[in-house]
Amino acid sequence: INKKNNTMPFYHTFSNLPLFQGLTEAELVTIAGNTRLEFKTISAGETVVEEGNKCEGMHFLLKGTLRVESYSHNHKYHITELISHNIVLQPERMFGLRPLYTRLFIAESECRILILKKEDIMRLSSDFMVFRINLINIISAKAQKVEDKLWFQRSGYLPEEIYSFIELRCIYPAGYKILHIRMKDLANELNMTRQTLSKRLKCLQNDGIVSLRRNTIEIPRLEDFYKYIQHS
């Protein structure tokens, strides 16, 4: 049996994950042989991670589509998004003052998940410099993006204000999103009248950027919303 051929699917799976990028095939095989790698198959509709649960490790989406539900602190509104690529579920929540998940992750389709415990992540960070750098880069990038958004100068252009309100609260700045909110509450959040907001949203719907239903704004592709703003 060709041992190298047997390790190739394993190598390609792990080399595409953010924490393992840059590691050699030999290093990945070493990690697999000395680390507790917990693989789970989650059926559609089952919860992967619940909001408020303690973050005691990292969950990697290997295959399938996740539905992410993110709620405001007062639960007056929430955002639904679909994620279908290799991501780590809120890695920044593993450390700090509040190591708790702040979003609900549900399998939209059957999902393949890899779970790494916190103690194993710390050991791998000590043993492999590339792994350690990847971990620091992921957490630093999260913090930097949040700070950059806070200081970004708004143009006052209403579609951009609506886009920024949604994008700032999403886990990933592209793909399918739904904002569940009363128009009254969204108008208050954006500091505008309900009539002005309603008029602009209808324009966005006519241009194919959003779909409107009662207390719901559906965005098929958030990246198209961004392109719309750039060319307006």
Image (tube, helix red, strand yellow):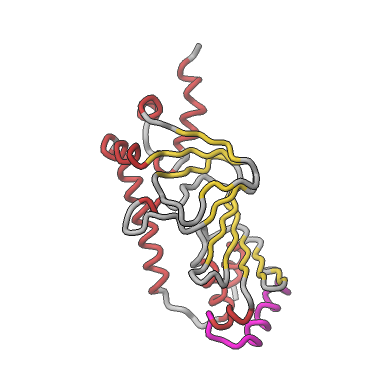
User: Which residue appears at 36% of the width and 58% of the height?
Assistant: 98
Task: Identify the residue at image location x=35%, y=29%.
Answer: 27
Q: Nearer the viewer, residue 208 or 79?
A: 79
Q: Count of labels shown?
A: 0
Q: Quadrant of the image for the C terminus?
A: bottom right
Q: Residue at x 41, y 74 (%)?
A: 152
Tell me residue 215's x, y (percent): 67, 73
Front position in the image: 162 or 120: 120
**From which residue to which does the magenta span run?**
189-207
Residue 25 position, x and y percent, is: 40, 28
Report which quarter residue 196 is drawn in.
Answer: bottom right
In reply to whether residue 126 is colored magenta, the answer given is no
Instruction: Report the side of 57 relative to 123 (left or right).
Output: right
The reply to whether residue 117 is visible in this rendering is yes
Confirm whether residue 164 shows in the render.
no
Residue 17 position within the rendered picture, expressed as x and y whole percent measured from the top left = 46, 41
Query: Residue 163 sits in which quadrant?
Result: bottom right
